[in-house]
Amino acid sequence: MLLLNIHAQRLVARLKAAFEDQRGATATEYGILLSFLALALVLGVAAFGQALNLHYMGMTTTLRTALGIP
């Protein structure tokens, strides 16, 4: 029983040390920030691409109408 108690105390001490350890927290925060920025960039490029496509489609339709092309 004493051996089990010693192992339990060691486990609790390791878990406590792991939760108090702040190493790598900054890198993790920067990684999360970078992923949000990448997501915003992808969504912005996608929205801009769709708007640009609609603009050029409108120009094409106008030119076809002006030139009498069906």
Image (cartoon, rainbow, N blue to C red):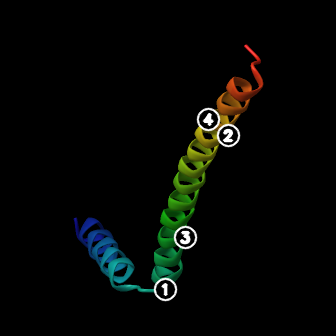
Q: CA distance from mark 3 to mark 1?
A: 19 Å
Residue in view at x 48 percent, y 68 percent: 32
Q: Nearer the viewer, mark 2 or mark 3?
A: 2
Q: Quadrant of the N terminus?
A: bottom left
**Disc 1 residue type?**
Arg
- Mark 3: few/some/many CA within 10 Å (<14, 14-19, 20+): few
Q: Nearer the viewer, mark 3 or mark 4?
A: 4
**Disc 3 residue type?**
Leu
Residue in view at x 49 percent, y 74 percent: 28
Q: Which mark is residue 34?
A: 3
Q: Earlier in the sequence, mark 3 or mark 1?
A: 1
Closest to the observer, 58 or 54? 58
Side of 10 relative to 49 (left or right): left
Quickly name the residue at label 1: 23
Q: CA distance from mark 2 to mark 4?
A: 5 Å
Q: Nearer the viewer, mark 2 or mark 1?
A: 2
Q: CA distance from mark 3 to mark 4?
A: 36 Å
Closest to the observer, 38 or 65? 65
Quickly name the residue at label 2: 56
**Disc 4 residue type?**
Gly
Q: CA distance from mark 2 to mark 1?
A: 51 Å
Quickly name the residue at label 4: 58
SS at mark 4?
Answer: helix
SS at mark 1?
Answer: loop
Kindly indicate whether the residue at mark 4 contacts the one at mark 2 (C-beta within 8 angstroms): yes
Q: CA distance from mark 1 to mark 4?
A: 55 Å
